[in-house]
Image (cartoon, helix red, strand yellow):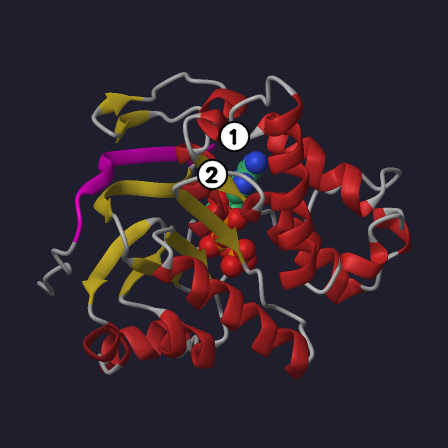
Amino acid sequence: MSMTQPQQGETLMQIRNLDKSFGGVKAVDDVTMDLRAGIVTTLVGPNGAGKTTFFNLITGNLPRDGGEVTWLGRDIAGVKPHRIARAGIMRTYQDLRLFDGMTVWENVLNATEYGALPIPLGSAARAARRERIERVLERTGLADKRNTRALDLAYAERKFLSMARIMATEARLWLLDEPASGLDPASYDRFLTILREDVAGGVTVCIIEHNLDIVIGISDRIAFLDRGKLLADGDPQTVLNDPELAKIYFGERT
Ligand SMILES: Nc1ncnc2c1ncn2[C@@H]1O[C@H](COP(=O)(O)OP(=O)(O)OP(=O)(O)O)[C@@H](O)[C@H]1O
């Protein structure tokens, strides 16, 4: 299979021959790809394909066994997750990892302190940060819940809070791990609106998603992983119409 990658935009992240094994399992096996500015890349593949491990390798949550990852031309081998976040790469987790005892506001504020946003020095900068958080809470539907602890939120609200934490920073690359799974239709529409607006505003997104409607609705490009290997990397229609990949995706491989 040789499929071409969209060529729009500068290369933000270059991934070369990335490897990671757990015991005898090759979770990520010789993966090479570029993440280009303005391109929405969706990672698809069956359960256990290595998608989350791939995220963990590029965010410094797991050490790689081999290969290279560069961000804006700099090797990020061995760089700690918080430094990678500060450099402009923010992510969500399938299990969300919110600060349950903190309020919505505090969770978002925490992300701006942790992630890619300059520390506000002086009252004007602090006011600008408050306004920025305010706007994010409006867009995610959480404005009325600002003083609610994360623990006390409904499921969809918790998912939006994990998005809000990223949106409040100036991260250039968002890595989203199944952000829309389990959302009701209204929340799902809100999620797509947010994503489209922020992509139009210049954010680059790599998203792990199982819902094919979402995959088709937002992807510029699909990267198909199976057993750690990148089997295809190209435009959505070509990848999704490949009968061999469909068999793997729907668990009908022979
Ligand atoms: N910390 C770990 N220790 C041992 N094995 C692991 C670990 N993390 C992942 N694996 C294994 O690595 C492989 C890839 O797992 P990974 O979670 O990256 O897949 P995935 O594509 O994200 O799956 P899903 O769609 O189910 O979330 C699987 O075989 C998994 O069991």
Q: Is residue 107 left or right of residue 144?
A: left
In this rendering, the answer to whether 137 lies above or below 165 is below
Q: Which residues are magenta?
A: 9-23
Which residue is situated farthest in the front direction here?
124
Image quadrant holding the C terminus, namely bottom left
Q: Which residue is mark 2?
A: 170
- Amino acid carrying label 2: it is Glu
In this rendering, the answer to whether 213 lies above or below 5 is below
Name the residue rendered at 85%, 38% in the picture.
102
Give the x, y percent position of residue 152: 91, 54
Q: Nearer the viewer, residue 235 or 197?
A: 197
Q: Nearer the viewer, residue 204 or 21?
A: 204
Q: CA distance from mark 2 to mark 1?
A: 5 Å
Q: Is residue 143 left or right of residue 223?
A: right
Q: Quadrant of residue 44?
A: bottom left
In this rendering, the answer to whether 29 lies above or below 144 is above
Q: Quadrant of residue 137?
A: bottom right
The answer to whether residue 22 is magenta is yes
Q: Would residue 171 be seen by someone viewing this image from the given angle?
A: yes
Image quadrant holding the N terminus, namely bottom left
Give the x, y percent position of residue 186: 66, 81
